[in-house]
Every structure is written in C-alpha cells, then in structure tokens.
C-alpha cells in the first residue's frame, strides 16, 4: 500500500471512527448541565468544542479540499454560552464527518499535492487533512478532560492490566464486533 493510501485510510479512520466514538462515550455520561459549562471565563465548554470541530471539518475538508461553498462563523463557535444539548451537537458533527469522509474517499494520490488557500493560509490537500486530524485530536482530548471533570470516573478508554494498554473505547461498536 502506498504511503498516500495509508495516510488517507488512517485519517479517515480517526475522523469517522476513533475520535467520534470516544466523544460519544463522553457525551453519553456528561450531565446535561455540563454541556455548556466552562471551567473558567477563558475556557471553552464541550458545546463550544463540538460546534468548533464541526466548523473546522466543514471549512477545511468540505470547503477547502472538497471545493464546496460553505458558510462559517468561527468566532460564534466560541462565543456561545448555550445551545443544543451535546447529543444534538455530536449528531451534527457526525453528519459533517460523514460528508468529509465522502470527500476523502474520492481523493487520489495526485490530489494530495494540490495547493489550497484556507483561512488565508497557503497549504495543500495533504496539509489540510493533516491539520484537521491533529486539530480534531487536540479537541477530543479537551472534551475527554472536561468530561472527566464534570463526570468523574465515568469514562475510561484503556485497560492497563498487565502493563498493556488494551482499548476499551470501542466496546459495543462495529470495531468491537470486528475484533471478535
């Protein structure tokens, strides 16, 4: 398998499987009152982060890579203090991820070098995808941290017995079914 195929395959996996599954586990245990709670005035809520990653995926993958016309108000993603519950926000995010996955599925090796300008930044298709994956990872970690603050002991993603980190985050999903 070519490096470009591996890159696209792993990027699609993280964006439509691992990260959303972990976020869903968080959203499922998060108290409803915590969805828009901020630990302090300069921090974001889970609601802000879910809206923000949906906006990022939409702008960078659907708009930038896919060439679709999109409308985004990035500042509003952070300014909001309330809105839909976390489950609805995650449903919207997963809808954007499904559309982004369709864009990524159509890419060929030669597409990765195509130049783009997103948010007034010069990049390439490969650079845009890389940005979205690392950006999504960072905010997934923030959502996990906030969930652990607002719902202590409710999420755990690995079993460390015997010194090995065995994933538990995919239990009850299609990934778990495939492992057996």
Image (spheres, grey):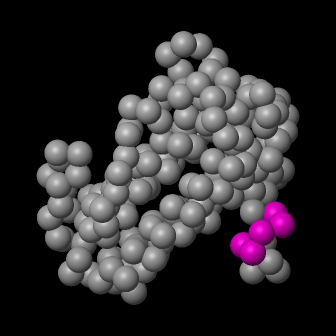
Indicate yes or no whether the magenta region holds residue 174.
Answer: yes
Q: In this view, does 68 lie above or below 136?
A: below
Indicate yes or no whether the magenta region holds residue 155.
Answer: no
Instruction: Write the residue at 78% across / 28% down.
Output: 33
Q: Quadrant of the N terminus?
A: bottom left
Relative image position of residue 43 (x, y in whole percent): 53, 21
Relative image position of residue 156 (x, y in whole percent): 78, 45
Q: Is residue 114 above or below residue 148?
A: below
Residue 85 falls left or right of residue 73: right
Examine the image and state in which quarter residue 30 appears. top right
Q: Quadrant of the C terminus?
A: bottom right
Instruction: Write the residue at 45% across / 67% down.
Output: 100
Viewer-proximal residue, 121 or 160? Answer: 121
Decide whether the magenta segment is chiefly helix, strand or loop. Answer: loop
Examine the image and state in which quarter residue 93 appears. bottom right
Examine the image and state in which quarter residue 38 appears. top right
Instruction: Write the residue at 41% across / 57% down.
Output: 58
Relative image position of residue 165 (x, y in whole percent): 72, 53
Residue 105 visible in image: yes
Residue 116 falls left or right of residue 44: left
Relative image position of residue 27 (x, y in whole percent): 74, 45
């Amino acid at each position: 398998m070519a490096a470009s195929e591996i890159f696209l395959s792993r990027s699609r996996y993280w964006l439509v499987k691992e990260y959303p599954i972990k976020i869903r586990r968080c959203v499922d245990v998060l108290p409803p009152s915590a969805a828009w709670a901020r630990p302090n005035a300069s921090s974001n809520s889970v609601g802000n982060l879910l809206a923000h990653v949906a906006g990022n995926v939409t702008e960078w993958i659907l708009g930038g890579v896919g060439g679709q016309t999109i409308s985004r108000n990035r500042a509003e993603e952070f300014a909001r203090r309330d809105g839909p519950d976390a489950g609805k926000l995650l449903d919207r995010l997963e809808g954007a991820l499904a559309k982004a996955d369709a864009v990524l599925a159509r890419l060929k090796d030669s597409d990765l070098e195509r130049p783009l300008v997103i948010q007034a930044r010069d990049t390439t298709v490969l650079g845009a995808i890389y940005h979205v994956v690392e950006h999504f990872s960072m905010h997934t970690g923030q959502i996990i941290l906030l969930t652990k603050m607002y719902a202590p002991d409710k999420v755990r993603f690995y079993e460390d017995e015997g010194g090995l980190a065995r994933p538990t985050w995919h239990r009850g999903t299609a990934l778990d079914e495939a492992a057996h």
